[in-house]
Amino acid sequence: MEGKREEIRKGPWKPEEDEILINHVKKYGPRDWSSIRSKGLLQRTGKSCRLRWVNKLRPNLKNGCKFSLEEERVVIELQSQFGNKWARIATYLPGRTDNDVKNFWSSRQKRLARILQNSNINTPSSSSSSIFKSHKINKEVPGFETVASECQIQKSSTESQPCSLSHINNNNYDTIKMVPLPDLVINPKLMDFDTTTDHARVEDLQQISFPLVPQPQLDITFSPGSQELLARFEDPYFFDVFGPVDDAPPELAAVDQQPFLKPLATCCRDGSENPDTFFDDFPTDMFDQIEPLLSPSDIFF
DNA sequence: AATATTTGCAACCGCACCACC
DNA sequence: AGGTGGTGCGGTTGCAAATAT
């Protein structure tokens, strides 16, 4: 029937459709998307064609390749500057689309939220995997809408010390910038974790890179929620979540000569090496009862 | 090994903006 | 000035793959 022929196709693209789209772009350039359908080449909307081209078919895309450390750093920094302007942020990342950046950020937010979640259930027994049993984060999770202060710790010295927030502050790190938000959220750059133990290791802390995200230094007035979480840093059991660190290896002393940022590797379709991200070693069940992270832009702009 | 759960990503939707008529 | 179509953007959803139990 005639109506049937006019039906608009949705869903995953077939290779044949991709080919038609590519040929169209070769002939006419990446424009006139609607004409693809009006010419009967594809039963896709112009919008759908454009999206397919921009996100998957365009040359030089880094499809199927994890964000490198440098890319992560750029996204974090630009997101703090521009907010959720994914298209704009993507222009700073060759081979990445706004969709890539958006998806990356979304995943990151969930991970961060879960880290925080775990930190919220901090009891001596809380590090058991049963308590850490993970769940998909969604809007049904109580408190999901609320967020918090961001705690950013910058490393500058490397003395091996028993670790609590105060120790980090006094001995291992020069500054702790607290950015007031409704609740408290730990900056992802804060810690890396031993996947076999659910524990953060001091050596990991020492090697984490700390992108310099420009943020205003503010007088701190914590919300009750933030104060509560901050108090947990002083709680002797707090690091049951992040792991014991007072048995840090002596070789830590040598770490301070290491660059903060690991060398970058190029990433790509050809399968070349891509460095692990900060989150690679996070146990998947680290976060629970999450609260989402507000972007700095939500707070300052 | 089978099943359940989580994660990452591709694609869609609704809205906004702009150019053209 | 207002209507229409094309395009771009950000948010959301659904599904397949990966991972956990």
Image (tube, coloured by chain):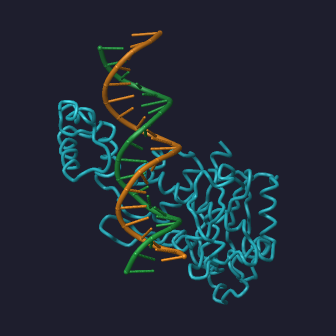
Chain colours: A cyan, B green, C orange
Q: At which x and y percent is residue A74?
A: 51, 57
Give the camera-side residue of B15 and A94.
Answer: B15
Is residue A188 among what the camera can see? yes
Q: Is residue A13 above or below residue A5?
A: below
Query: Taking A65 as reference, is A37 left or right?
Result: left
Q: Is residue A38 above or below residue A293?
A: above
Residue visible at 18% across and 50% down in the picture: A16
Q: At which x and y percent is residue A203?
A: 62, 81
Give the camera-side residue of A86 and A21.
Answer: A21
Q: Quadrant of the C terminus of chain A?
A: top right
Tag count in the figure?
0
Quadrant of residue A153 within the rendered picture: bottom right
Give the camera-side residue of A130 and A83.
Answer: A130
Residue visible at 73% across and 60% down in the picture: A177
Q: Quadrant of the N terminus of chain A?
A: top left
Is residue A220 among what the camera can see? no
Query: Taking A7 as reference, is A89 left or right?
Result: right
Q: At which x and y percent is residue C20?
A: 52, 75
Give the camera-side residue of A300 and A138.
Answer: A138
Q: At which x and y percent is residue A212?
A: 61, 60
Quadrant of residue A247 within the rendered picture: bottom right
